[in-house]
Amino acid sequence: MAKAGLEKSWVYLYKIINLRKSSQLENFMAPLTKTRTSYFVYLLKCGDGTLYAGITTDLKRRLKEHACGQASAYTRAKLPVACVYRERHPDRSSATKRELEIKSWSRKKNGL
């Protein structure tokens, strides 16, 4: 078993040495150096008093899209919108689970 791991290491090193163009090397190394993206769960209060929950990787951009009416059909029809809550999550899975949890709450529990 250790021998198989050692062979994989040598194959990996051989590929790195034989990549001549820097762009090829960057593409090869990308999966190893990729940074993790944070996700945000946010809650908007719309102009008619309703709430909208969503997730995004770029909160500032997404809020701007909502304000301009370019993000979702729901918020476009209920402008203006204001962000009343946000929280950060390490991955899309946990952010989606939290969004669904928030959407399942009653309006009374949200306190808004």
Image (cartoon, grey):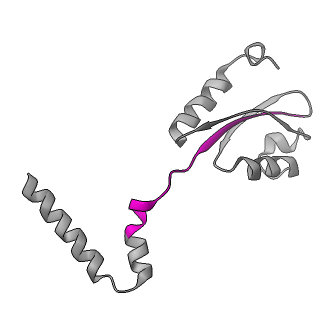
Residue 37 position, x and y percent, is 55, 50
Residue at horizontal 77 percent and vertical 13 percent from the top: 108
Residue 22 position, x and y percent, is 42, 82
| Left or right: 20 as drawn, with respect to 52 | left
Q: Is residue 20 above or below residue 11?
A: below
| Left or right: 102 as drawn, with respect to 12 | right
Q: Is 108 within the magenta?
A: no
Q: Is residue 63 above or below residue 11?
A: above
Residue 48 position, x and y percent, is 91, 30
Q: Quadrant of residue 81?
A: top right
Residue at horizontal 79 percent and vertical 16 percent from the top: 111
The tally of labels here is 0
Viewer-side residue, 76 vs 63: 63
Q: Which residues are magenta?
A: 29-46
Residue 50 position, x and y percent, is 84, 28
Q: Is 38 within the magenta?
A: yes
Q: Residue furthest bottom?
A: 20
Residue at horizontal 54 percent and vertical 42 percent from the top: 92
Q: Is residue 52 above or below residue 107?
A: below
